[in-house]
Amino acid sequence: MTLAYWERHCFDDPAVVADRDELLKSADQNPDPYGAFLSLLRSGRRDAVCTALEYFHYQDRQARWGFGNPLDEYAAEVLDRARWVLRGTPLPGVRGQDRASALWAIQNHAQAAGAPLITAELRAVARRR
C-alpha cells in the first residue's frame, strides 16, 4: 500500500484522481510518479497536497532498502507544503489524516522552523485523546 489515507479518498476533481491513480500504479505499468507527484504537491488543494506528502513519505520509507528517496530534490518544497497544511484548519471529514500526512512527510526532514507547528500539532492530538 502506497497511500494509506488517500488511496480511497473521494476527490471532486478528475485530474486529481488521475494523478493519485498514477502514483498507485505498479512498476510494470510504467507510472510517471514525478509528474503526478508535483502536480498534486503544487495543486493548492489540501487533500491533493496531502496525497503528495504521503507519497513522499512512502518514498522515504523505501529508501531504507538503500536506494534513497528519488524525490529528495523536492524536500524543501515538501517541507513548505507540510507546514502549510499544519498551519491551516484541519480538513473536515478526514479524521486528522491531513495532519498525519504532513507530519509523516517531514519526520525525516524537519528543521527548526517547523518545530512550533509540529509541537502544536502533537499537543492538539494529546488534547483530543
Image: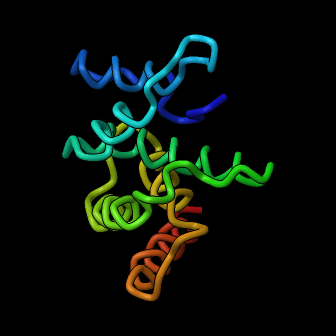
Left or right, residue 12 beside residue 67: left
Residue 112 drawn above or below residue 103? below
Look at 59% across and 34% down and name the residue there. 4
Q: Nearer the viewer, residue 125 or 9?
A: 9
Residue 100 % position (x, y): 52, 54
Residue 9 % position (x, y): 42, 25
Look at 35% across and 24% down and name the residue there. 19
Residue 122 % position (x, y): 53, 72
Look at 27% across and 58% down and name the residue there. 89
Q: Tell me where residue 85 sits by quadrant.
A: bottom left
Left or right, residue 3 beside residue 41: right
Q: Nearer the viewer, residue 41 or 114?
A: 41
Residue 94 drawn above or below residue 123? above
- The colour scheme of the drawn protein is rainbow
Left or right, residue 37 beside residue 107: left
Residue 74 drawn above or below residue 110? above
Name the quadrant of the C terminus: bottom right
Farthest residue, direction right: 65
Name the quadrant of the N terminus: top right
Residue 49 % position (x, y): 33, 45
Look at 61% across and 18% down and name the residue there. 26
Farthest residue, direction top: 29
